Image (cartoon, rainbow, N blue to C red):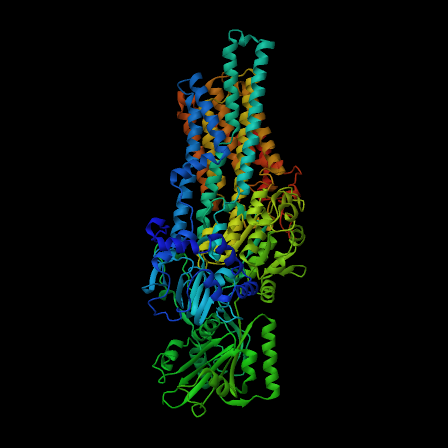
């Protein structure tokens, strides 16, 4: 797109400058245009437009001459170049600011600057590096460098992943910068310009299929219809009119589906409807729940580590000063203080779980790749985990819950009732309706229509789009969706794949006037349309008529029967049809009737008759051919998906621009609107105070006739993410209002009020928003997780989203929830495993230092245990596949602790066993194994037993609740098995061949057997510790109360548990008595 820039005043002549000063100011224009350009407020906009003098009044205000613009071929109309430059300088141009893309290096720096855990690691690494080099220049650098290497790996992986995802998304959402539009410019007349060169006051021309580039007022039109579903959510094309009672407002981002028009540009760029929505997308959301919890945990761990380090330093100095043992008699105060400081730093380094950020990155990156196979394209890695704990899903209706295309679901064809018109593989009417009657119905469907159906092959896609990964095999609709529904039915197996194009071509509508068939397009005022089809003989004509069921029925005196005969419309038969039409309407179906009339050539001159003549003389005494019920159907997977969400404790709400009756019908069918649920319209929603909205939020299931701002406010009120926190922020979204008197009256409220209401304590819901239209953009961005549709979604929706549903199926959201919960649990599994290692390592270091022992694990051993085991544990536990049972629990609250009570029980139980084992081996090891106390051989035995404790405890860590099944689905966890095998082999290599570098000594087969068996006791210990009755706090769960489970892990075990106690007894017997 050409860059838009204001031209300096030096390029204008003096007359231009004087004219510029006479134009209304930018603030005056903005205020005036806003009064007639409020979203979803057509009546008030029309009222304000009339008060301003209609289109001519606005044109006069903008100093645009529209009197001579009725002829688009006039070469002396439109703005001159100098006028364009003036307006561009004063009002700006039709371009939107976009955030520049961050470079890989910037993303790399962000990983360090924005992550407190990484910052703690860097500080600990630097201190460890300096002290280590001072203490032992040969190997003292190893620990510090190892931690820095871990930080580097985490940052590189995260930055690379973010950069690749952004590249992939930009390929998906790339907009064609060369888009042009036709505009009147003097003296050239009709001119093609880039859309960013449009200025306020321009007169633009659009035809069917054009995208409206800015907000405008209709000046004149020829049967213009606009698809506003992308902006308002309405699936029905809107007929535009310059009449006083019509709809003259054109909205940017919408598509013209029929007709042609001229309109006056009144709002461009960031002030247009699309621009206002885009402005919301520039605001970034706060940290995700996982990031908040990890930062909090890193802070706590840091404090614990520093406290333990301080206590260790104080204890060691106290021993030196007060006790003065013999082994310190030759040590100076400075040397001992330095030793105590080194021990303290070691404790801090050991305390910080440097594998945690790596585990998170691995878990999220692994899940991202797996989720793509489940048709979930992840734009932001953190969205994986966040979706798992979503408590609310606010879903758009059109295109998300429904297919965004009208479909005939039932009907009466030649007096044959069909309750299901969408079967596959068979012709339902075959044998029921004769060929003659079928031909009449198909001829009416094909000719009495302006819509077209294109196959996937007929639609040219942009190259390089990720959309191609999931092919959209649906037919592409051009034109009226209701007409298209009938064409799709004709093409389906229901009518044996009829060729409507051939019928339409044979009718010869495009022939010169007076020589071919005639068409009088559908009018929303008349609610019907007619075509006059010329037969092959050139003299006979047939009327085919289509329209609202009740209107067409009134004008029919006969009906088509299944045998092809025409029968009189008796009162009883008319009543029967009326009841059917009423029944369809009560089911929120659009009722359309088809009729025809033969031999009309002797009634009017068909080649030249007008629409009025057709209505008055021909659209009477017709034969009723068919009555159909048309609906924008639910996606086939929606009902089950909604039910699954509710069983998982997720509150599903429908937010749509559709009318309340249709919204309620769809919501009930989908299972969203329940008996005790509440539905309301946007107009009433906006009148609520924040307190009133909070009262109804627990029951609000349907919000109809909503504007984009309504959706945005609802999400803000649920999660509080973008709630104004200061008086200045509040006034920014409520200009001209009084903070002191209205702050508690206007939505969305303010942060302090929101945090203290409904017992929130500052903690909001975790909200997922689904949508496909431009109107969903602000809510998608404000949500914790925004989910856009990949096939039918607009670029705005995709830009605002965190996850793109590639197949447009609501059920794919369930997969996102499942993977999200799996990520959350996998991180918990790693924490359970990691903290067990750290508790043991920290405690043994503290105790050995206080007792005056040489630390049993040297720097290289600690490197293996503290870094390699962390990384291996992250790979093993961070890549566990999800289990279906995860959807049978409620989501966790945003402030729920990452470590629950059962996890603490497991950590303390395993830590107690491992500490007892290490202390026992430290004291009794030389006697049992026949080695010298404190020797390399002695410490190698301790080291080997400790490592195998971690290896076997890794199996225990696969469950974080009361279920004991450590070997469950190992075949489905190849990474786990690979890590275990690698760890065992690496441990063997370190022990047998480490030598002086690792300060280890080779062990005998018996020593290997005994240390492995000591480590294996961790498995039966995992069963025993789960017998301790500890439950997860019910208050840590959020979302809906479910009847199929409390959301808390249930007790249970595998058949392996039966053998645990005998095996334990055998191991103890072997170790003690053999």
Q: Position of residue 371 (x, y in %)?
A: 46, 50
What residue is drawn where x is 41% and y is 29%? 989
What residue is drawn where x is 37% and y is 50%? 6
What residue is drawn where x is 60% and y is 31%? 908
Q: Is residue 930 visible?
A: no
Q: Position of residue 694 (x, y in %)?
A: 65, 51
Q: Is residue 647 visible?
A: yes
Q: Position of residue 671 (x, y in %)?
A: 60, 61
Q: Is residue 665 toward the left or the right of residue 985 in the image?
A: right
Picture mark count: 0
Is residue 1024 or residue 255 the one in the foreground?
255
Q: Is residue 749 toward the left or the right of residue 8 in the image?
A: right
Is residue 282 or residue 769 the one in the foreground?
282
Which picture quadrant has residue 825? top right
Q: Is residue 248 above or below residue 316?
A: below
Q: Which residue ends up furthest to the top in the rendered image?
A: 330
Is residue 392 or residue 611 the one in the foreground?
611
Q: Position of residue 414 (x, y in %)?
A: 51, 83
Q: Which residue ends up furthest to the left in the rendered image?
A: 188
Q: Is residue 514 above or below residue 793?
A: below
Is residue 489 or residue 234 the one in the foreground?
234
Query: In which quadrant is the N terminus drawn?
Result: bottom left
Q: Which residue ends up furthest to the bottom in the rendered image?
A: 602
Query: In which quadrant is the C terminus drawn?
Result: top right
């Amino acid at each position: 797109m050409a860059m838009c820039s204001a031209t300096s005043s030096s390029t204008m002549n003096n007359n231009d400058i004087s004219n510029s000063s006479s134009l209304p100011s930018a603030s005056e224009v903005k205020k005036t245009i806003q009064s007639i350009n409020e979203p979803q407020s057509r009546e008030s906009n029309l009222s304000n437009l009339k008060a301003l003098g209609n289109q001519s009044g606005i044109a006069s205000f903008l100093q645009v001459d529209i009197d001579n613009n009725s002829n688009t071929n006039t070469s002396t109309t439109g703005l001159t170049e100098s006028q364009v430059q003036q307006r561009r300088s004063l009002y700006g141009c039709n371009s939107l600011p976009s955030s520049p893309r961050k470079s890989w290096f910037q993303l790399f720096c962000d990983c360090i600057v924005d992550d407190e855990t990484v910052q703690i690691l860097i500080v600990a690494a630097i201190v460890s590096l300096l002290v280590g080099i001072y203490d032992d220049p040969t190997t003292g650098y190893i620990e510090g460098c190892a931690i820095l290497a871990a930080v580097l790996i985490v940052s590189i992986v995260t930055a690379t992943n973010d950069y690749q995802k952004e590249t992939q998304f930009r390929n998906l959402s790339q907009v064609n910068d060369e888009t042009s539009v036709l505009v009147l410019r003097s003296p050239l007349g009709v001119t093609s310009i880039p859309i960013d060169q449009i200025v306020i006051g321009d007169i633009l021309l659009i035809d069917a299929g054009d995208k409206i580039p800015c907000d405008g007022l209709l000046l004149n039109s020829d049967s213009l219809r606009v698809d506003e579903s992308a902006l308002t959510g309405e699936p029905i094309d809107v007929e535009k009119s310059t009449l006083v009672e019509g709809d003259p407002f054109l909205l940017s981002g919408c598509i013209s589906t029929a007709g042609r028009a001229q309109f006056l540009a009144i709002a461009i760029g960031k002030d247009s409807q699309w621009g206002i929505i885009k402005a919301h997308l520039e605001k970034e959301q706060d940290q995700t729940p996982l990031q908040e919890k990890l930062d909090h945990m890193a802070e706590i761990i840091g404090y614990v580590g520093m406290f333990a380090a301080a206590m260790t330093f104080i204890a060691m100095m106290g021993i030196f000063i007060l006790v003065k043992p013999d082994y310190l008699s030759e040590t100076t105060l400075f040397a001992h203080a330095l030793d105590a400081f080194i021990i303290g730093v070691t404790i801090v380094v050991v305390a910080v779980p440097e594998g945690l950020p790596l585990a998170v990155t691995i878990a999220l990156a692994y899940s991202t790749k797996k989720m793509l196979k489940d048709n979930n394209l992840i734009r932001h890695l953190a969205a994986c985990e966040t979706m798992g704990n979503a408590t609310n899903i606010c879903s758009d209706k059109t295109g998300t819950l429904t297919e965004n295309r009208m479909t005939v679901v039932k009907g009466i064809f030649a007096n044959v009732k069909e309750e299901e018109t969408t079967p596959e593989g068979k012709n339902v009417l075959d044998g029921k309706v004769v060929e003659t009657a079928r031909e009449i119905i198909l001829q009416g469907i094909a000719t009495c229509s302006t819509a077209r159906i294109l196959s996937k092959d007929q639609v040219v896609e942009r190259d390089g789009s990720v959309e191609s990964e999931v092919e959209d095999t649906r037919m592409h609709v051009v034109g009226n969706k209701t007409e298209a529904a009938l064409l799709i039915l004709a093409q389906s197996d229901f009518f044996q794949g009829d060729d409507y194009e051939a019928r339409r071509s044979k009718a010869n509508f495009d022939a010169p006037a007076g020589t071919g068939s005639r068409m009088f397009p559908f009018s929303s005022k008349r609610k019907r349309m007619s075509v006059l089809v010329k037969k092959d003989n050139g003299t006979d004509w047939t009327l085919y008529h289509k329209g609202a069921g009740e209107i067409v029925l009134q004008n029919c005196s006969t009906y088509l029967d299944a045998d092809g005969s025409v029968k009189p419309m008796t009162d009883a038969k008319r009543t029967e049809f009326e009841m059917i039409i009423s029944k369809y309407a009560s089911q929120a179906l659009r009722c359309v009737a088809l009729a025809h009339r033969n031999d009309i050539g002797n009634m009017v001159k068909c080649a030249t008759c007008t629409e009025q003549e057709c209505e008055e003389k021909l659209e009477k005494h017709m034969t009723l051919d068919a009555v159909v019920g048309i609906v924008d159907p639910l996606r086939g997977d929606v009902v089950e998906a909604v039910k699954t969400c509710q069983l998982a404790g997720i509150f599903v709400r429908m937010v749509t621009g559709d009318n309340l009756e249709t919204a309620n019908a769809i919501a009930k069918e989908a299972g969203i609107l329940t008996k005790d649920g509440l539905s309301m319209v946007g107009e009433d929603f906006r009148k609520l105070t924040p307190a009133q909205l909070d009262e109804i939020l627990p029951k609000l299931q349907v919000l109809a006739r909503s504007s984009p701002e309504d959706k945005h406010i609802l999400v803000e009120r649920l999660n509080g993410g973008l709630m104004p926190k200061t008086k200045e922020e509040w006034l920014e979204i409520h200009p001209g209002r009084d903070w002191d008197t209205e702050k508690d009256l206007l939505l969305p409220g303010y942060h302090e009020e929101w945090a203290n209401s409904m017992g929130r304590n500052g903690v909001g819901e975790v909200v997922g928003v689904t949508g496909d239209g431009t109107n969903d953009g602000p809510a998608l961005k404000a949500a914790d997780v925004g989910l856009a549709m990949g096939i039918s979604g607009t670029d705005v929706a995709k830009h605002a989203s965190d996850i793109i549903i590639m197949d447009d199926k609501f059920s794919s959201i369930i997969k996102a929830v499942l993977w999200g919960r799996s990520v959350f649990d996998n991180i918990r599994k790693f924490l359970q495993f990691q903290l067990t290692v750290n508790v043991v390592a920290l405690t043994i270091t503290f105790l050995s230092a206080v007792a005056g022992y040489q630390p049993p694990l040297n720097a290289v051993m600690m490197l293996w245990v503290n870094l390699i085991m962390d990384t291996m544990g992250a790979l093993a536990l961070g890549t566990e596949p999800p289990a279906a049972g995860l959807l049978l629990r409620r989501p966790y609250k945003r402030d729920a602790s990452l470590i629950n009570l059962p996890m603490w029980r497991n950590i303390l139980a395993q830590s107690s066993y491992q500490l007892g084992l290490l202390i026992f081996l430290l004291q009794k090891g030389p006697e049992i194994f026949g080695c010298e106390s404190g020797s390399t051989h002695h410490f190698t035995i301790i080291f080997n037993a400790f490592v195998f404790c971690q290896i076997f405890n890794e199996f225990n860590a696969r469950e974080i609740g009361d279920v004991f099944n450590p070997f469950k689905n190992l075949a489905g966890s190849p990474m786990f098995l690979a890590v275990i095998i690698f760890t065992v082999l690496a441990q063997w290599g370190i022990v047998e061949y480490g030598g002086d570098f690792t300060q280890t000594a080779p062990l005998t087969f018996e020593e290997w057997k005994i240390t492995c068996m000591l480590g294996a006791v961790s498995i039966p210990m995992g069963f025993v510790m789960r017998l301790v009755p500890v439950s997860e706090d019910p208050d840590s769960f959020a979302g809906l109360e479910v009847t199929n489970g409390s959301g808390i892990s249930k007790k249970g075990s595998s058949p392996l548990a039966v053998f645990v106690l005998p095996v334990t007894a055998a191991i103890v017997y072997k170790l003690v008595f053999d």
